[in-house]
Image (tube, rainbow, N blue to C red):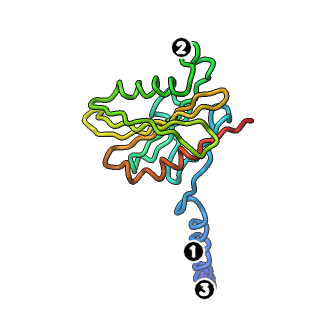
Amino acid sequence: MKKKETKIFRLFTPVVIILLISGLVGCDFFFPKPKRVDFVGDRFSITKPARWKIMNNLNEDADLQMANPAKEAYTVVFSEGIKEMAEFGIFSRDKYAEYTVGMILNNLEQSQLYPAENLEGGIHNGVKHKITGTLKGLNFIYWHITIETPEYYNQIVVWSLDSHFKQNESDFNTVINSFDTNYE
């Protein structure tokens, strides 16, 4: 009886191994895929790049936080009502961008703000600022994107260590270019 069990075991072991490997190859374990993430009550969505994680410790006020800590790549997204911001004297996308970029600059040492770049070709009215600076002795590069939708000002802030920024640009562009509204 033992010989039969050994023969069956030898016969089925390669089949089981092949099935396990094909299952792992077909899943996100080896080849993770970007995923759409909804936020602000599903009003907006953005693409989370492969190997990135949803976070909850980057900024407690953010509507969405995600990162790839292994690559030192980080993103926070804020969406604030246009009517609410008008109560603070902010009546345009550019004023909102100036206000929110200023908050980042105030937290950095040796900061530099580069000229704004209008985002063209998308369905949203957006502007992008590049910011460099030092925080706790580390050099960072930020892209601060402000997008105006009919009811919200949205800011997407992506950043990385200066030494890692170039390798993360593709993921950052995926995040920024994927921003979309889920309402008409």
Tag 2: residue type?
Answer: Phe
Residue at (37%, 36%) from the top-left corner? 114
Element class at badge 3: helix
Classify residue 65 as left or right of residue 183.
left
Element class at badge 2: loop
Tag 3: residue type?
Answer: Lys
Q: Earlier in the sequence, mark 1 or mark 3?
A: 3
Residue at (29%, 34%) from the top-left corner? 134
Dot 3 corresponds to which residue?
Answer: 7
- Mark nearest the camera among 1 and 3 is 1
Q: Residues within 10 Å of mark 2 (few under 14, many from 20)?
A: few
Dot 2 corresponds to which residue?
Answer: 88
Residue 171: x %, y % from top left: 48, 51
Residue in the foreground of this view, choosing between 94 and 100:
94
Tag 1: residue type?
Answer: Ile
- Mark nearest the camera among 3 and 2 is 2
Dot 1 corresponds to which residue?
Answer: 17
Element class at badge 1: helix
Residue 53: x %, y % from top left: 51, 45
